[in-house]
């Protein structure tokens, strides 16, 4: 009979343990995992990227829902274990379930520590630990603008960076005189602080919070020195506490965390603990690498493959804090037993410190360039004798003359991926045993590079060294999604070469892993087919994301926004009256002038949307689409005494010329009437600066989380040339960018010079414009199209009990 294996917790350390158990013996266990969050296993490290808008919640899943099904794991989410009955060997949940076990793993992790201050229970005071915490911060940033982050460690700085990216004014309060004092010495911490201040982060150092003030919601903080600061949001990032209450109640030995031996066994031989809730040899670890090492040791023990067990970890940290590279390992500060090699380049903002005792490295602090971190840390762990090294050779890749020599010099035990604890030996063994040839295959098999991704170059170097002449550098690519190893360019080329007509045909002929595709390739293939065959292919609305499918942005409460087109931000008295009457008729809770100079109606019930469009009688503003959103402009020479050209009129013409046509991602354009740039065109996808002798054209800008200033293309004399080049540029972007790729990263990828060379050759403009016009001729205005089709209108029907 199979053993009943139950795990409390669905986090990174616990699920990694289950993965390792399945690798060793997938047949001996009936596995149940109980998690109190309503999500599958996700990468908690990447929450800061979600907050910063660099990725989405779905994209940080480590194992999706299907993985549990494929491995016959019974997953219970949104459910909390409230009792462990050791005598009768079952756990009880808050949903009145009793689940029997033969073996029990406690992987409950930690909780964010909320300082027990007066006012800590006010609305707007949260930790930063879960998806729900992250989503609360993102929602708060939409309404409120002043945030305080308490804690100047890694988590606090990442939270602050994300809130700044969300448009908030952020102060970081830290009780210590320097930031990240657990990882950095004073010199490195000061470099970090200067870099972060340049990004807009503000610091209140050596401050201790006395009280959080407010009636129902936080309004300010008061410090022990009598000073205070106003705020609408307080994020506590002052540490974590192991979640051990359930173990204590069950009578297991608990100190700071649940006490375990080298095989992760608690004081009950059938109960194990792993991750942040476990205490091994007096230490409760909070970094990913040691927790994964614990999972491997536990998997060995529980499947009967006894080894030496978990021996503890020397901690290291390699991070990119708000875009700033740093690494630390072992000791941070000098003492009587250490000697230091220090290089501090203030101009280049780089700092290196190596601490040495008895000719052995005992500590490392790197800032600004952390590329040597793993090499130095492996020397530290092996206690390598460096008496034959010079200071220079220790600091810069030792005796290795190149990347390949460095890989060759590494031992099998050297760590390559610190996040996941993957050694060079594990990678080489997997390459040889599994026939791996690409980074993506190595990542899928070993997890190397599966978290922060900073070790990817080293993994590829190991691939090249291991495979020798059979290594194919061109094969080191990512497929367009998990269904295929083919890139976007290869898929598009095959569609054209084989004359494929539908996305389903593409997936079948090109051998996609899933016949119905996935959430990434379905909308992408729909876009590519529509772009390649505009006059033949019928758009598949079902493949689009919900906002595009419903022709309006869905809001957090399930209602929609209705934003009509206002060319150049202009309107008429009649349209304003009509908007007011419609807003009143449908009890619209929010009417707002948007950042794109339009009037938006927010909080519209789904079933009211079509009739509201009909009552408005206006065109869609496409505020939800992957297409041109708007053209921002100033009033130009029509009214402004500095205006050199009619920027308002040109902006309207440009908007009318480009609107409706699908693009790989949303686009924004701008026209400013003079070099004073009131319309902020130099961070737009396509920008025009009006000057005395014509129009300066710029491209590839972005004002989002990763700001990119435009490149200049050329100066032209007429509006007609501006519009023709705009059409050609949009079509070039449509034909060569990946679906979901903004123009800024596209320009970075293909090269601004290539874009310039293409668009500055007069013979290229006309064909691109012709293909754009052919595509535009197939589009109908979105709202009127839905109103004319009863089947489309049915999408908005709501059945209520």
Image (tube, grey):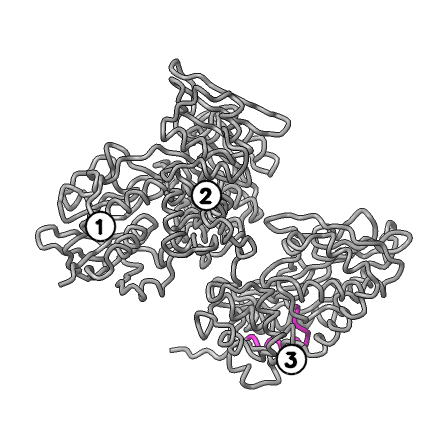
| Viewer can see residue 149 | no
Magenta region, mostly helix, strand or loop? helix
Residue range (magenta) = 609-621
First in sequence, mark 2 or 3: give its number: 2
Q: Which residue is mark 2?
A: 218
At a point 28% along the width and 33% down the height, the residue shown is 283
Picture quadrant where residue 19 is located: bottom left
Classed neighbour count for the residue bearing mark 1: other residues with Cα under 10 Å, few (<14), some (14–19), many (≥20):
many
The x and y percentages for residue 446 are 38, 51
- Cα–Cα span, label 3 and label 1: 58 Å
Q: Which mark is residue 47?
A: none
Indicate left or right for 789 with 151 as reference. right
Q: Secondary structure at mark 2?
A: strand
Q: Which residue is mark 1?
A: 105
The x and y percentages for residue 310 are 25, 39
Specify whether residue 616 is painted magenta: yes
Q: Quadrant of the C terminus?
A: bottom left
């Amino acid at each position: 009979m199979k053993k009943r294996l139950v795990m409390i917790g669905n986090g990174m350390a616990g699920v990694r343990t289950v993965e390792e158990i399945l690798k060793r013996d997938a047949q001996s266990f009936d596995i149940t995992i109980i998690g109190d969050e309503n999500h599958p296993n996700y990468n908690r490290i990447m929450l800061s990227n979600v907050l910063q808008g660099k990725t989405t919640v779905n994209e940080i899943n480590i194992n999706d829902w299907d993985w549990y099904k494929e491995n016959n794991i019974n997953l219970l989410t949104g459910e909390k274990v409230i009792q462990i009955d050791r005598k009768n060997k079952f756990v009880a949940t808050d949903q009145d379930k009793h689940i029997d076990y033969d073996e029990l793993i406690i992987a409950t992790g930690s909780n964010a520590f909320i300082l027990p201050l007066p006012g800590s229970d006010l609305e707007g005071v949260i930790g930063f630990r879960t998806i729900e915490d992250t989503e609360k911060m993102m929602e708060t940033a939409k309404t409120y603008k002043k945030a305080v982050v308490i804690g100047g460690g890694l988590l606090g700085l990442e939270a602050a960076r994300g809130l700044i990216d969300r448009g908030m004014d952020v102060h970081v309060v830290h009780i210590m005189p320097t930031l990240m004092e657990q990882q950095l010495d004073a010199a490195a911490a000061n470099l970090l602080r200067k870099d972060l201040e340049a990004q807009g982060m503000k610091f209140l150092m050596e401050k201790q919070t006395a009280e959080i003030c407010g009636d129902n919601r936080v309004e300010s903080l008061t410090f022990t020195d009598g000073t205070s600061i106003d705020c609408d949001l307080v994020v506590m990032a002052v540490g974590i506490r192991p979640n051990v209450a359930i173990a204590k109640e069950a009578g297991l030995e608990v100190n700071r965390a649940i006490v375990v031996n080298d095989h992760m066994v608690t004081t009950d031989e059938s109960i194990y603990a792993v991750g942040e809730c476990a205490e091994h040899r007096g230490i409760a670890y909070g970094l990913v690498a040691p927790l994964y090492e614990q999972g491997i040791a536990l998997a060995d023990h529980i499947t009967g493959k006894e080894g030496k067990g978990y021996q503890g970890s020397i901690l290291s940290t390699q991070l990119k804090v708000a875009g700033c590279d740093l690494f630390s390992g072992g000791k941070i500060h000098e003492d009587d037993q250490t000697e230091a090699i220090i290089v501090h380049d203030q101009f280049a903002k780089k700092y290196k410190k190596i601490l040495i005792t008895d000719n052995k490295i005992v500590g490392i602090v790197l800032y600004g360039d952390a590329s040597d971190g793993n090499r130095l840390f492996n020397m530290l762990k092996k206690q390598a004798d460096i008496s034959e090294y010079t200071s220079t050779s220790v600091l810069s890749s030792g005796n290795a003359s190149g990347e390949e020599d460095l890989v060759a010099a590494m031992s099998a035990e050297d760590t390559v991926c610190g996040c996941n604890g993957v050694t060079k030996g594990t990678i080489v063994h997997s390459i040889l045993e599994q026939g791996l040839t690409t980074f993506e295959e190595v990542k899928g098999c070993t997890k190397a590079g599966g978290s922060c991704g900073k070790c990817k170059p080293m993994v590829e170097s190991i691939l090249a060294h291991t495979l020798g002449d059979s290594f194919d550098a061109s094969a080191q690519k990512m497929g367009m999604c998990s269904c295929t190893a083919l890139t976007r360019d290869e898929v598009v080329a095959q569609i054209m070469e084989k004359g494929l007509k539908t996305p389903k045909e593409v997936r079948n002929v090109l051998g996609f892993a899933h016949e119905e595709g996935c959430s990434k390739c379905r909308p992408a293939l729909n876009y590519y087919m529509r772009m390649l065959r505009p006059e033949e292919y019928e758009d598949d609305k079902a493949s689009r994301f919900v906002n595009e499918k419903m022709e309006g942005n869905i809001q957090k409460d399930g209602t929609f926004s209705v934003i009509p087109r206002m060319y150049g931000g202009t309107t008429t008295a009649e349209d304003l009256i009509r908007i007011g009457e419609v807003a009143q008729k449908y009890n619209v809770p929010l009417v707002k002038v948007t950042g794109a100079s339009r009037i938006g109606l927010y909080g519209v019930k789904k079933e009211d949307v079509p009739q509201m469009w009909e009552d408005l009688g206006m065109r869609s503003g496409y505020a939800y689409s992957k297409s041109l959103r708007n053209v921002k402009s100033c009033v130009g020479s029509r009214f402004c005494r500095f205006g050199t050209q009619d920027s308002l009129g040109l902006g309207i013409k440009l908007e009318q010329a480009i609107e409706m046509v699908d693009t790989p991602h949303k686009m924004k354009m701008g026209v400013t009437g003079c070099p004073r740039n009131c319309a902020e065109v130099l961070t737009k996808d396509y920008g025009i600066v009006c000057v005395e002798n014509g129009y300066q054209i710029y491209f590839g800008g972005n004002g989002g989380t990763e700001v990119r200033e435009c490149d200049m293309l050329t100066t032209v004399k007429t509006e007609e040339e501006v519009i023709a080049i705009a059409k050609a540029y949009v079509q070039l972007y449509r034909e060569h960018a990946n679906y979901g790729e903004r123009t800024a990263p596209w320009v970075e990828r293909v090269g601004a010079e290539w874009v310039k060379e293409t668009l500055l050759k007069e013979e290229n403009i006309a064909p691109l414009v012709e293909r754009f016009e052919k595509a535009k001729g197939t589009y109908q205005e979105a709202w009127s199209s839905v109103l004319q089709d009863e089947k489309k209108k049915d999408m908005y029907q709501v059945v209520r009990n």
